[in-house]
Amino acid sequence: MPTVTFRNTEIECAEGDILRTVLTGADLSPHNGVADSLNCGGHGTCGTCAVEVSGETSDMTDAEKRRLSLPPHSQDSGLRLSCQARVEGDVEITKHDGFFGQKITQEWFLNQWVNCHTLLAHFVRSLRKGTERVFIKISKLIFG
Ligand code: FES
């Protein structure tokens, strides 16, 4: 029987069991804070059950791939959705901080900040150009 280790607790389960079910069955939660109540109930859509898994688990489901490709997760985070991953051998689970338990590195955060700043700067430039065009059209209408 595989063993799931989470927060210094070892839980035995059957091979093929859903990781989230194993944890909740042992009164442990793969969710942080209010996400324990505000989640999709295991449908693979909210992303709040994301955990870092070391050990043997099933391949990612399509729902899991889809959700983990959306912020604040990223495809290269190495996280799994515990409601989608099936236990296939002994596993060790780590839950990261944040509503989604997202794994954010300083580099990732800085990249997001730079992307956001670049996008904002582009938006302001576009807005200014658009505003200038509107003023030019209005002044042509008024003054000919
Ligand atoms: S509980 Fe919502 S994605 Fe797993």
Image: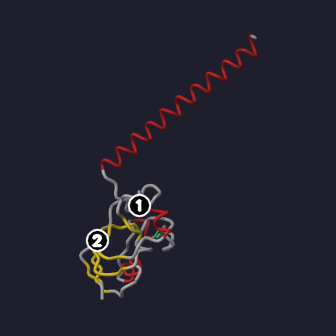
Residue 41 lies left or right of residue 111; in this view the side is right
Q: Specify the quadrant of the image occupied by residue 130.
A: top right
Quadrant location, the C terminus: top right
**Label 2 SS:** strand
Residue 31, position in %: x, y? 39, 69
Judged from this view, the residue extending furthest toward the front is 59
Q: Which mark is residue 54?
A: 2
Judged from this view, the residue extending furthest toward the top is 143
Judged from this view, the residue extending furthest toward the left is 8
Quadrant location, the N terminus: bottom left
Q: Is residue 74 above or below residue 137?
A: below
Residue 5 lies left or right of residue 111; in this view the side is left
10 Å neighbourhood of mark 1: few (<14), some, or many (≥20)? some
Residue 66, position in %: x, y? 49, 63
Give the labeled residue for mark 1. Answer: 99
Task: Please report the residue visible at 50 percent of the width from the left and 68 percent of the height from the top.
Answer: 63
Measure how far apart labels 1 and 2 are at the Cα level.
21 Å
Amino acid identity at mark 1: Phe
Task: Please report the residue visible at 38 percent of the width from the left and 78 percent of the height from the top.
Answer: 19
Q: Is residue 25 above or below residue 113?
A: below
10 Å neighbourhood of mark 2: few (<14), some, or many (≥20)? some
Amino acid identity at mark 2: Ser
Task: Please report the residue visible at 70 percent of the width from the left and 15 percent of the height from the top.
Answer: 139
Which mark is first along the chain, 2 or 1? 2
Residue 89, position in %: x, y? 30, 81
User: Label 2 near label 1: C-beta < 8 Å?
Assistant: no
Q: Which mark is residue 19?
A: none
